[in-house]
Amino acid sequence: MIVLDHVSKSYDGGKFAVQDVSLEVPKGQLLVLLGGSGSGKTTTLKMINRLIEPTSGKVLVNGKNVLEGDPVQLRRSIGYVLQGSGLFPHMTVAENIAVVPRLLHWSAEKISKRVDELLDLVHLPAAQYRDRLPRQLSGGQQQRVGFARALAVGPSVMLLDEPFGALDPVTRDELRIEFQNIRKQLGLTAVMVTHDMTEALLTADLIAVMNHGKLLQVGSPHQLLTNPVDDFVGALLSSPKKQAEQLEALVGASV
């Protein structure tokens, strides 16, 4: 569904922010781009929908080279979720969700029906929430509306840039599980950026580890945990294991 073929990005013609990245995301799976700040993961994500133009290489979505079409139409066809939801503060919940359908000239009746369907999907009853402004919502509710907006035109591909990063731990876990259920229910293919190793391990079908713009390893969470390709990947993935061991020791000490 998503293919990056020797994709690179240089902003100044010299140093590469992303260098020679090749990977594939099978239909219906979630790939998590994992790495530290400056690793190139967000740049890689944004090259899929051309928010950033690659310097070289090809990006294919559903078999089509994204560089050969209209970037605006491309972005409208791909769901995109930001950290902190990115809702328009002067628009109601319903108006926020309806942004792209209105640009595509859907009828008012079709838009209203779709808004109600999506609010039900993200567990925000339409009668209670459709006319609220973002400031009248909690952080978790705002992010649910962000998910609904990203799903408005029924995309088959979704991109997520630290979608749970601004939330408290309890809400973060709830939304992560809800997103997984929605993604599987709709058969979405998704790419997500995160700094959180535990989140990556619990969420991803595939994890792509990046460092200094280079792709180091792609594999399932089990593969990366049990067979890291080098010391960097091993150290990165060891953090959640160490935390789990420390928590287990604390529980044992209190018994």
Image (tube, rainbow, N blue to C red):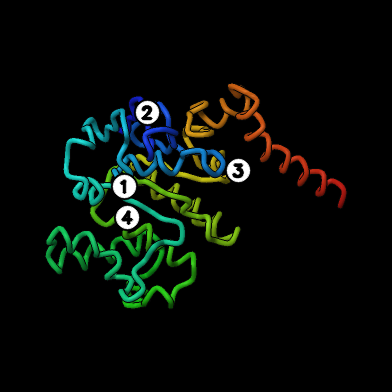
In terms of sequence position, does the residue under pointer 4 or pointer 3 come before the other? Answer: 4
Report whether residue 136 is seen.
yes
Q: Amino acid at mark 3?
A: Thr
Q: Residues within 10 Å of mark 3 (few under 14, many from 20)?
A: some
- Is residue 232 found left or right of 122 in the rendered image? right
Q: Position of residue 180 (x, y in %)?
A: 45, 47
Give the residue pinned by disc 1.
51
165 is higher (above) or lower (below) than 215:
below
In terms of sequence position, does the residue under pointer 2 or pointer 3 come before the other? Answer: 2
Q: Amino acid at mark 2?
A: Glu
Q: Position of residue 131 (x, y in %)?
A: 32, 77
- Could you tell me how many numbered marks the image carries? 4
Mark 4: secondary structure: helix
In terms of sequence position, does the residue under pointer 3 or pointer 1 come before the other? Answer: 1
Marks 2/3: CA–CA distance: 22 Å
Marks 1/2: CA–CA distance: 19 Å
Marks 4/2: CA–CA distance: 22 Å
Marks 3/1: CA–CA distance: 28 Å
Give the residue pinned by disc 2.
24
Give the residue pinned by disc 4.
150
Q: Are marks 4 and 2 in contact (CB under 8 Å)?
A: no
Q: Residues within 10 Å of mark 1 (few under 14, many from 20)?
A: few
Residue 198 got which mark?
Answer: 3
